[in-house]
Image (cartoon, grey):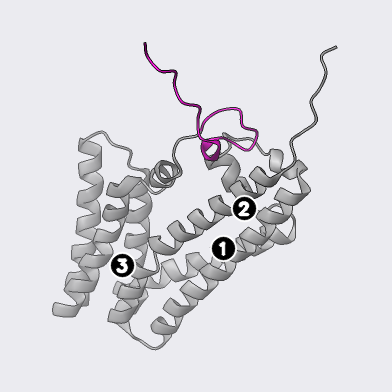
Amino acid sequence: MTSPPRAADESTRDPDGEEPLPPFGEMVSQQLGGWRGLVESSVPVVVFVVVNIIWELNPALIASVGVALVIGAVRLAQKRPVRHAVNGLFGIGLGAIIAWRTGEARDFYLPGIIQSYVFALALLISAAVRQPLVGWGWSVIMAGGKSDWRQDRRLMRTFIWLTVVWAVVWILKVSAQAWLWWDKQDDLLGIARLVLGTPPYVLLALFTVAVVRRVTRDRPPAPAVENA
């Protein structure tokens, strides 16, 4: 006699408890392009840092852009999604153009610095107008597109302050890179770009899920509706 399937873990259900959700790690991995996507997004930057240290700027630019193009081509040949590769190639290409025109290796990282400040500003604005981006991100990634949290005052407050936390962390990490850019610390800036790239995102995502799940778990159950 086979044993009945185990009930889905409450922590893997959506806020209404209707359908089991995939494991959180799988969701984050999918949003970042999987572990392969994480590695591929870092490789061109690593190539640029290493070649720039042992050689000079122009070979580093050529090598990093070349590696990004190869990664995109391999994904196309394998018929894999190329969205993450294209996004990475755009950032690498724009940074390479700026650095080539200015002749400064540090300017390779300038588009990423500006983009991070814009992202942090968007987070703060969304929190101020009560449209927290972290809440909408939760709707897309964890709640199957539902936005019931907007009718829950406690969840609304939670997503607002979580959005502010994301903004503050983003400002701190990009400000560290901006200071290294201003101080012309090219090699340290490259290392900071790698260290302060994906890890803060993953830690913030884990923190967000833990907080929201605790809030939804502690919510009083909705009153039952009698059948007519």
**Residue that carries the numbered disc 3 in the rendered image:** 96
Q: Amino acid at mark 2?
A: Leu
**Residue that carries the numbered disc 2 in the rendered image:** 133
Q: Amino acid at mark 3?
A: Ala
**Label 3 residue SS:** helix
- Left/right placement of residue 7 relative to residue 218 reads left
The magenta span reads 1-20
Q: CA distance from mark 2 to mark 3?
A: 30 Å
- Left/right placement of residue 101 relative to residue 136 reads left
**Label 1 residue SS:** helix
**Label 2 residue SS:** helix
Q: Residue 108, image x and y in percent?
A: 33, 71
Of helix, strand and loop, which mostly describes the magenta segment?
Answer: loop
Q: Nearer the viewer, mark 2 or mark 3?
A: 2
Image quadrant for the C terminus?
top right
Q: Residue at x 21, y 35 (%)?
A: 78
As drawn, the label of residue 127 is none
Q: Residue 119, image x and y in percent?
A: 55, 62
- Left/right placement of residue 176 relative to residue 40 reads right
Instruction: Say above or below: 110 vs 179.
Output: above
How would you rate the neighbour count of disc 1 (Cα within 10 Å): few for under 14, some for 14-19, many for 20 or more? many
Q: CA distance from mark 1 to mark 3?
A: 28 Å
Residue 49 seen by the camera: yes
Q: Nearer the viewer, residue 116 or 220?
A: 220
Q: Amino acid at mark 1?
A: Trp
The part of the image, by quadrant, that contains residue 93 is bottom left
**Residue that carries the numbered disc 1 in the rendered image:** 166
If you read the primary sequence from the N terminus, does the residue marked by circle 1 or circle 2 appear first? 2
Q: Nearer the viewer, residue 88 or 57?
A: 88
Q: Nearer the viewer, mark 1 or mark 2?
A: 1
Instruction: Say above or below: 8 vs 112.
Output: above
